[in-house]
């Protein structure tokens, strides 16, 4: 979008700004049953060269399909707490850290 606006900035600089401004990406998809579900929650970890580093925190695991075509599944932790967890806690948002363990779900 920056490039479409006519800004004359190198792509690497744009990537650096986006990687430093975005903490988390929530990916949503429409499934075969027509419902939309959050399929992944990913933390942006910064840049390594020209590559934006990301770490998946949660993902949707499909476990089956009911006779009416509805998709069954659950969200599964990848066993990694986000780097900004301490910032959340310091700002008064106290999440149970065990929700990030693989055994939580």
Image: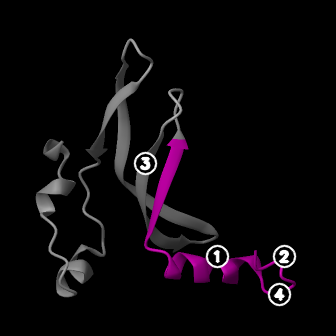
Q: Is residue 10 magenta?
A: yes
Q: Residue furthest right?
A: 6
Magenta-highlighted residues = 1-29
The residue under the point 84% across, 76% down is 4
Task: State the CA–CA distance, disc 1 to disc 3.
Answer: 25 Å
The residue under the point 52% across, 33% down is 31
The residue under the point 49% across, 75% down is 22
Q: Say if mark 1 contacts mark 3, CB within 8 Å.
A: no
Name the spot of residue 101 as percent of width and height, x first.
17, 51
Task: Give the side of residue 98 with respect to residue 4, left or right.
Answer: left
Work out whether residue 7 or residue 64 is closer to the camera in this orientation and state it.
Answer: 64
The residue under label 4 is 7
Mark 2 crowdedness (10 Å alpha carbons): few <14, some 14-19, many ≥20: few
Q: Give residue 30's mark.
A: none
Look at the picture and state if 59 lies above or below 20: above
Task: Give the side of residue 82 with respect to residue 24, left or right.
Answer: left
Q: Which quarter of the figure is the N terminus placed in?
A: bottom right
| Label 2 secondary element | loop
Work out whether residue 30 or residue 52 is closer to the camera in this orientation and state it.
Answer: 30
Mark 1 crowdedness (10 Å alpha carbons): few <14, some 14-19, many ≥20: some
The residue under label 1 is 15
The residue under label 2 is 4
Look at the picture and state if 99 lies above or below 92: above
Name the spot of residue 54 as percent of width and height, x first.
47, 61
Look at the picture and state if 26 lies above or below 29: below
Q: Give residue 38's mark.
A: 3
Q: Is residue 23 magenta?
A: yes
Which mark lies nearer to you, 1 or 4? Answer: 4
Which mark lies nearer to you, 1 or 3? Answer: 3
Work out whether residue 70 or residue 77 is closer to the camera in this orientation and state it.
Answer: 70
């Amino acid at each position: 979008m920056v490039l479409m606006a006519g800004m004359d900035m190198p792509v690497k600089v744009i990537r650096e700004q986006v990687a430093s401004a975005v903490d988390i990406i929530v990916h949503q998809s429409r499934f075969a049953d027509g419902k939309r579900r959050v399929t992944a929650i990913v933390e942006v970890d910064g840049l390594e060269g020209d590559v934006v580093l990301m770490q998946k925190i949660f993902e949707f695991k499909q476990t089956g399909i009911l006779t009416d075509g509805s998709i069954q599944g659950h969200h599964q932790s990848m066993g990694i707490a986000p780097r900004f967890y301490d910032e959340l806690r310091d700002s008064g948002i106290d999440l149970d850290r065990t929700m990030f363990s693989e055994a939580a779900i």
